Amino acid sequence: MQLKELSEQSGVSAASIKYYLREGLLPAGDAINATRARYSARHVERLELIHALRRIVGLNIEQIRGILKMADDGAPRLDLLAAVQRVVLELDSVATADGGVGTRAADAVVRLRGWPDSPSDARNALNAHLELMESLNIPVSGELLDTYSKAMDDVAGVDIAATTAPDSVDELILTAAVGMHVHSQLVLKLLALAQASHAIRRYERDA
């Protein structure tokens, strides 16, 4: 297919396609002559991914470029999923006050749940958040961490099972990025509803 057909099939304007080509997000088509190229279903899939990362997840061009470069360079799926998680959930590689060793609470959660005792942006973010709560004198009991981590372990198991199945790397990124974005919001909204419901039950008699 040529540019016009690619635009029609993908629903992306010709101007946007040319922009993605210039930015290196979309691989060049097979040249027909000096001004025309032929594109394939692979280009349609990549455009679907770019559109979802921009419109649904809200990533910028530089963030998308970084993820796609890893994919095109053949990065292992585990590294690719970690990069997607870092960008989508805004997990910066935060150095903890203890030099990155971690908090006792975070280490206890890892042991309790049987999670791999490996460094990651997610673990750094948890360490940093637990340190923040401690600095604010907000207690985090073992019971609370047990309850929260058990619930999240169940949710994460379902999420990852859904994102590791696709054979296509672009489909893997699409499923993981959109899934992480919308599912994390779903967890927050369900938590908000549960909190509101518990508050109503406790305080409606006092109203």
Image: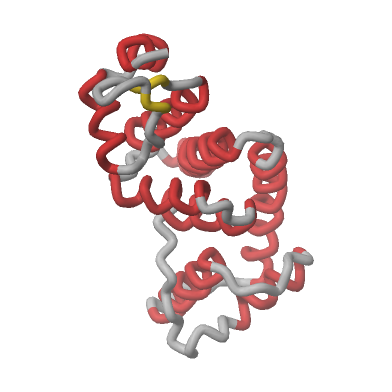
Furthest-bottom residue in this view: 98
Examine the rendering and report whether any part of residue 194 can be seen.
no
The colour scheme used here is: secondary structure
The quadrant of the picture occupied by the C terminus is top left
Q: Is residue 154 toward the left or the right of residue 136 in the image?
A: right
Residue at 71% from the left image edge and 36% from the top image edge: 165
Q: Position of residue 33 (x, y in %)?
A: 31, 22
Query: Which residue is nearer to you in this view: 174 or 178?
Result: 174
The quadrant of the picture occupied by the N terminus is top left
Q: Is residue 169 toward the left or the right of residue 153 in the image?
A: left
Query: Which residue is nearer to you in this view: 161 or 8?
Result: 8
Examine the rendering and report whether any part of residue 131 can be seen.
yes
Q: Position of residue 189 (x, y in %)?
A: 47, 38
Furthest-front residue in this view: 33
Query: Which residue is nearer to you in this view: 204 or 12?
Result: 12
Residue at 69% from the left image edge and 53% from the top image edge: 153
Residue at 57% from the left image edge and 33% from the top image edge: 171
Residue 8 quadrant: top left
Q: Position of residue 82 (x, y in %)?
A: 55, 57
Relative to 39, residue 61 above or below = below
The count of marks equals 0
